[in-house]
Image (spheres, rainbow, N blue to C red):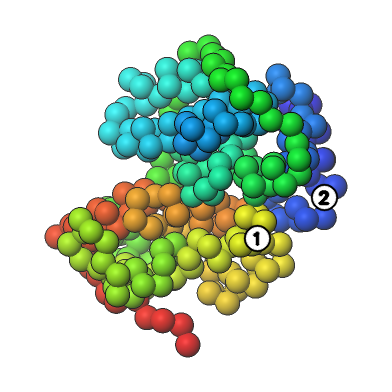
């Protein structure tokens, strides 16, 4: 508890972190100051990159395997052991990073879905850590943690049925994190029967939240203006989607960072919606 308070004060003192929810994001310099026994750091990069150098104490996670199992197996049968194997404990802070924000955000979202209370993204990921010239190591870390029972937080995962209901009752906003060409239907992904978008959704490509040079989230003022321009109501429940959950996780994180009250990820996204026979599709319209 003392650690969480100290970390929150550390973040609050940084003017770059004046977001409504700074507690889910951490800067590289701040992470480097934290006691190793108070935080579990998870590396979502490919194996070859991890072994070439990583943040001291970081444990590599095979995100692709975790992603497949989000909806395939009950938590009681698999997630307890999987999280224990990488040293994750229910009440321990977890920080996630990668070189590709989509994979880091995907892992962050899985952790939050599984019930981790304090899960954070390293702002700028591996790029920021290297830019700060902070220490690295090459040894493989294999910590363990006591086996715990995890219960998925249902509100963080949107299903096709949920989205169909939202289209009827308008109780949640739906946001598309894909490229403009996917949104308009100009680009149809291989293996998906139909191109286009969920009717009435807001197009907000995940890259629009990120500074292309630093790979960090844009300042609060810029994100606030972006959301206002797209008429995103942060007080209303929101559902994000993409092709398979990764880009949607970045957008979900961004909305939560900006104070979104209830944000869920339609994790099966267009890979399911575009192939289903009971889902409406429209060609998303370009903004004027």
**Residue 248: percent from the left, percent from the top?**
44, 54
**Residue 41: percent from the left, percent from the top?**
62, 29
Number of numbered discs: 2
Q: Which dot marks residue 14?
A: 2
Q: Is residue 141 left or right of residue 280?
A: right
Instruction: Tell me where residue 43 sits by quadrant.
Output: top right
> Relative to the observer, which residue lies in front, 213 or 81?
213
Give the residue pinned by disc 1.
Answer: 213
Instruction: Tell me where residue 91 sits by quadrant.
Output: top right
Q: Residue most toward the right? A: 13
> Relative to the observer, which residue lies in front, 93 or 260?
93
Residue drawn 41% across the image and 67% down it: 179
Tag 2 and tag 1, C-beta contact below 8 Å: no
Q: Residue most toward the left? A: 277
Residue drawn 58% across the image and 77% down it: 229
- Secondary element under disc 2, as helix, strand or loop, is loop
> Relative to the observer, which residue lies in front, 252 or 193?
193
Does label 2 or label 1 sit earlier along the sequence?
A: 2
Q: Is residue 89 left or right of residue 19?
A: left
> Relative to the observer, which residue lies in front, 4 or 88?
88
Q: Is residue 89 left or right of residue 11?
A: left
Q: Residues within 10 Å of mark 1 (few under 14, many from 20)?
A: few
Residue drawn 54% across the image and 74% down it: 231
Residue drawn 72% across the image and 47% down it: 131
Q: CA distance from mark 2 to mark 1?
A: 20 Å
Q: Residues within 10 Å of mark 2 (few under 14, many from 20)?
A: few
**Residue 68: percent from the left, percent from the top?**
32, 36
Establish if 22 lies above or below 204.
Answer: above
């Amino acid at each position: 508890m003392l650690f969480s308070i100290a970390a929150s004060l550390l973040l609050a003192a940084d003017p770059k972190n004046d977001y409504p929810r700074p507690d889910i994001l951490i800067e590289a310099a701040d992470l480097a100051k934290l006691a190793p026994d108070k935080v579990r750091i998870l590396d979502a990069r490919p194996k070859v990159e991890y072994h070439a150098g990583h943040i001291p104490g970081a444990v590599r996670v095979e995100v692709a395997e975790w992603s497949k199992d989000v909806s395939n197996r009950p938590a009681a049968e698999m997630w307890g052991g999987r999280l224990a194997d990488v040293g994750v404990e229910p009440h321990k802070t977890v920080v996630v990073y990668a070189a590709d924000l989509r994979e880091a955000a995907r892992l962050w979202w899985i952790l939050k879905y599984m019930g981790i209370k304090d899960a954070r993204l390293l702002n700028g990921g591996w790029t920021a850590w290297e830019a700060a010239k902070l220490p690295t190591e090459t040894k493989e870390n294999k910590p363990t943690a006591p086996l715990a029972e995890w219960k998925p937080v249902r509100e963080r995962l949107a299903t096709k049925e949920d989205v169909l209901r939202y289209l009827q009752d308008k109780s949640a906003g739906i946001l598309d994190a894909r490229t403009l060409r996917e949104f308009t239907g100009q680009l149809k992904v291989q293996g998906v029967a139909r191109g286009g978008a969920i009717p009435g959704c807001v197009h907000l490509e995940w890259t629009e939240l990120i500074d292309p040079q630093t790979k960090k989230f844009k300042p609060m003022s810029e994100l606030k203006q972006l959301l206002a321009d797209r008429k995103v109501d942060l007080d209303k429940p929101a559902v994000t989607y993409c092709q398979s959950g990764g880009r949607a996780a970045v957008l979900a994180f961004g909305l939560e960072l900006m104070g979104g009250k209830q944000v869920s990820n339609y994790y099966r996204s267009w890979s399911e919606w575009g192939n289903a026979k009971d889902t409406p599709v429209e060609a998303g319209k370009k903004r004027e």
